[in-house]
Amino acid sequence: MTPTSPRPLRAAPNGVVLHRQIFLTLRDEIARGLFPSGMLPNEEALRARFGVSRVTVRRALADLAASGIVERRPALGTFIIERPTQEMPGPSLTILDSLRKTAMETRVQVINVEHTEPPADIMRALRLQPGEKATHAVRLRNNRSGEPAMLVDAWVPGSLGQGATKTALKKHALYEILLQQGVQFGRVVQEFTSAMIINPAVATMLNTSVGSPVLKLVRLMHDPDEHPILHLTALMPAGRASVLMEIPGDLVNTLRAGQIIVDAPLPNTKENTRRK
């Protein structure tokens, strides 16, 4: 399979400049293995393909080289830096197994912890009353290479979040702190979206740029009595983290296996979440 020939790029859709568009396109195609020779087309071929100037192509290739994806060899061309292939990991048996695995395989940096009144969307999700406070924890998890893998923004009802201090979160994952307090986990509702535009502050923390592809995971966890106990949003730069799910055979033909919702927010009400 070879890369397709898109129409000439237009300047700055959604604020993404031309050389950045080429960078993102080529990075995706490299990740998918669309250059089996291990070498990118020459500058003239790329210029003709994307309908841009040679200077624009060179800036995109320079960004790929700076990211450690390709190597520019004078008079020879642009070569893809080979990375060891990884087999798809086996799925976790439970959501707690997944949380435990993430905590073990990453290093956490606690950005902020506060006890405050949440914004309206979080208040609705956690079914809090006006004026009721919640514990808000923002953490950055780095992968084994030291690169930011995910930015996690979590909210817990104030009655459950007293033990989630900055000191405690440096030693234990949030779910562990809740378990130590006797909290039990029940049903989980998850939503995945592509957060293409992130603000500069978030881009800096994730060591990426505004406009780079970022996977957004929103997770709402309940206790066995259907009370929301944890609202979590995780932003993951493309190429540094992925989400693996397993659907048992007996759930394939049910909505419990998941559904696609177009232009709809994460269900907040008890009635709507049960439909998942």
Image (cartoon, rainbow, N blue to C red):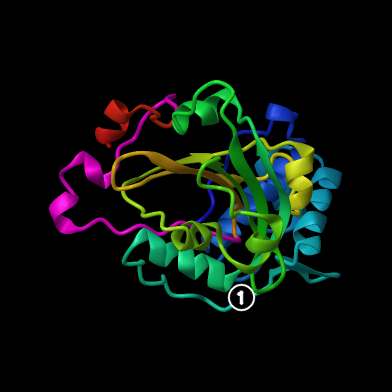
Identify the residue shown where x is 52% and y is 66%: 102
Q: Residue at x 52, y 64 (%)?
A: 33
- Residue at label 1? 83
Residue at (38% x, 59% y) in the render: 95
| Residue 190 drawn above or below residue 249 | above
Asked if residue 258 lies in the magenta stretch, the reply is yes
State the quadrant of the C terminus. Answer: top left
Q: Quadrant of the N terminus?
A: bottom left
At a point 67% along the width and 64% down the height, the residue shown is: 170
| Residue 13 in view of the camera | no
Nearer to me, 15 or 65: 15
How far from the left and from the top, in percent, is residue 52? 76, 38
Q: Is residue 156 magenta?
A: no
Q: Amino acid at mark 1?
A: Arg
Task: Pick out the residue farthest to the bottom.
Answer: 84
Asked whether, in this view, residue 67 is left or right of residue 33, the answer is: right
Q: Which residues are magenta?
A: 240-265
Question: What type of secondary structure mainly makes up the magenta span?
Answer: loop
Residue 7 place in picture, x, y as percent:
60, 34
